Image (cartoon, grey):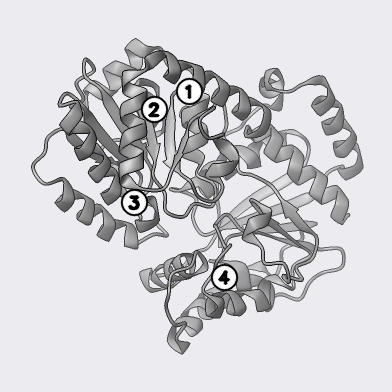
Amino acid sequence: MELVKTEQKKFNDYLEFLDRESIKEFDGLLQQLGEKKVAMVSATGFGGGVAEILHSLVPLMNDLGLNVDWWVLSSCPNQFYNVTKTFHNCLQGQEGELVQRDREIYLHYNELNAYQMLEWNYDYIVIHDPQPAALIHYRDKKAGEKWIWRCHIDTSTPNMEYWDFLYQYISRYNACIFTMSEYVKENHGLPNLTFITPSIDPLSYKNIPLTRERAQEIVSSFGIDTNRYLISQISRFDPWKDPLGVIDVYRIVKKELPEVQIALVGSMASDDPEGWDYLYRTLRKAGEDYDIKIITNFNGITGLEVNAFQTVSDVLLQKSLKEGFGLTVTEGLWKGRPVVAGNVGGIKLQIEDNISGYLVSTVEECAEKVLHLLRNPMLSQEMSEKGREKVRKEFLVTKNVLNYLNLFVKLA
């Protein structure tokens, strides 16, 4: 495995986002934990919500006095990530058969990476998502070593063949974290079941306040006309994010408001080879409509550019068909923008329908809500303010760190 380097962060810089009770809780937990050693393990260090969370979570935990390393899988070819993307899709309910060859590929590269753990000496090993979940099978636990599996996807209606295969490994962990209780079957039998929502970093380039003028300057460089309506969806190119449906929404809206334009902005993650196929499908769907802007990290998109698109958009979409959580919803709400999103998974934890945004189930319903917000800017502003306050209370990285510390103390 490979060690990921993260930028330094100072927890004191985040105190403005905490109330007095939370600060006292941090102090008590840290006194109990001392200088515990923690390994975070994920598939990749770039692209997608998990990597983004860990780039903030890891340095903040280190600044609090824990010793935290972040490791990612190495020596894994595309065939491994093709298999694990199928795992991801089938755990979210896609039909399919888990063939023997895919089992062998999955286990082979877990075993290969597990050899590099022989000299590890950690108090807590936190494994993120299905890709590295079988590492536990190839390691003899040391005394006092606690293993935690963190699932970031919606497993409420899984393909049972894939779930049963994975269950034989995750049932051996000391604790399992899911985003919400609906993702776990009642007869799960999983140890120390814990529910923690993902979070955003309010001080990252993606979320720091941008002036509207600066944000407009940035998006203009991608061909956006800042004098016209802009709808944006910020997400990976993935069937579950429904970028093709987003274009259908835009085309319905455009019939009513011809001046509207749309941006689909996403990064191409190294552990998601299927993303390229869906990007090409999205490009074909867009055709030669120059009011549809499809932009990736290969066009120069970083956290700052995402921030700019979210800041200037009149409406943000997250039209997911399945969604473990959907950090881009939280990001949009934090920037005080109205969000219309799929009525699925962890999105329902973030948006109170008709209060802080809209939850929708069809293309037509989505288009209707977008038009309503574009025509009612005062309503849009009122919803946005309520959404931002909910994020401040529940979905910032400080809350995420606190939840992990509570679990570590419980397991100790």
Q: Secondary structure at mark 3?
A: loop
Query: What residue is pinned by disc 2?
Result: 310
Residue displayed at 57% across by 37% down = 350
Q: How far apart are the alpha carbons under marks 2 and 4?
A: 38 Å
Q: Which mark is residue 335?
A: 1
**Sequence-first disc among 2 and 3:** 3
Q: How far apart are the alpha carbons under marks 2 and 3?
A: 19 Å
Q: How far apart are the alpha carbons under marks 4 and 3?
A: 33 Å
Query: What residue is pinned by disc 3?
Result: 242
Q: Amino acid at mark 3?
A: Asp
Residue 183 lies, in percent from the top left, at 62, 59
Q: Nearer the viewer, mark 3 or mark 1?
A: 3
**Sequence-first disc among 1 and 2:** 2
Residue displayed at 50% across by 30% down = 354
Residue displayed at 61% across by 32% down = 8
Q: Which mark is residue 113?
A: 4
Q: Residue furthest left?
A: 288
Q: How far apart are the alpha carbons under marks 4 and 1?
A: 40 Å
**Sequence-first disc among 4 and 1:** 4
Residue nearer the viewer, 149 or 187:
187
